[in-house]
Image (cartoon, rainbow, N blue to C red):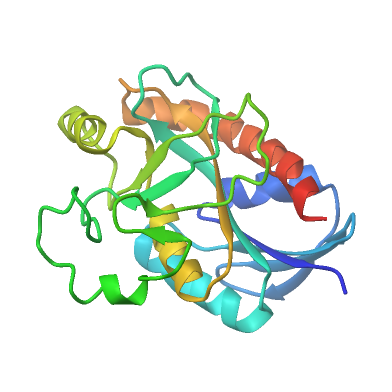
Amino acid sequence: MKPIVAVLCPMDMEFHAVENVLGLWGETLEGGFEEKHFSANGIDLILARCGVGKTFAAAKAQKVIMTYHPSHVIVCGVAGAVDPALGLFDVVVPDRVIHGDVYLGGPLCKTGVTESAMPMFRGNPAFSESEGFLPDRLGAPAEFKRGTLATLDSFAEEDKKDELEKTCNAACIDMESAAVAQIATLWDVPFTVIRAMSDARTHSFGDFETNAAKACDVAAKALMTLLDSLR
């Protein structure tokens, strides 16, 4: 039986970049936030657009896991750099994912709201009280950067990036990965995050609009490299 891998892309352009790099016609599974099925190179791949933000991402991750029972979940798309050493279109496959605004426990928590969340993850090897959610890097090559990805509810201004750099040594930020990681961890499904930088540490929203399409293509090609580890 071929493994089932679910790939979640928040935005249309991320979704279509993966479609393009697959070079196949997928079977459409539902309307709205699309889901398509691809069978290629020994893998059954469910490609889903989850929408932007934590709520949409968590809901779609839950739906995809319950419906298709994937053996692995991957988030693929773009991110913003926090680490000044990251350049445009660099690929980050993080080894740590956190909620950068409401962190669930550990030394980074400033809210004190941990009791409802922490017991869900104790004993699960994909979560650490001090490190957050722990993705599988799938043997990512050296040119794919590592580090901490922080998920936020909105684009971050410079003061927020300063805080994330200081408190958790964040390499980059997005708006979905920690939510998907949390759902995957609850279901004991391994997960991986692949993000290409669409903007550098100092940026404007206009930079994102200029660079996002190319960053989507870079992330999609990186996905193909990592899928080799799951065949």
> Farthest residue in the front direction?
123
Residue 203 figure quarter: top left
Q: Residue at x 51, y 70 (%)?
A: 61
Front-lying residue, 59 or 103: 103
Quadrant of the snapshot with the N terminus: bottom right
Would residue 23 be found to the left or right of residue 171 on screen? right
Above or below residue 71? Residue 97 is above
Q: Is residue 77 visible?
A: yes
Going 52% across and 52% down the picture, which residue do you hit?
135
Q: From the viewer's perspective, is residue 215 above or below residue 132?
A: above
Tell me the residue at 50%/39% (across/down). Answer: 78
Horizontal relation, residue 42 to residue 54: left or right: right
Query: Residue 219, relative to residue 189: is it above or below?
Result: above
Image quarter in which the C terminus is found? bottom right
Count the marks. 0
Horizontal and vertical percent position of residue 2: 85, 69
Is residue 175 at all visible to an observer of this figure?
A: no
Residue at the spot 25% in from the left edge and 61% down from the top edge = 104
Is 96 positioned to the left or the right of 12 in the image? Answer: left
* Residue 63 occupies quadrant: bottom right
**63 lies left or right of 152:** right
Q: Quadrant of residue 173?
A: top left
Comparing 112 with 157, the one in front is: 112
Whole-percent x and y of residue 80?
40, 33
Residue 24 image point, x, y percent: 86, 53
Q: Position of residue 19 (x, y in %)?
A: 74, 51
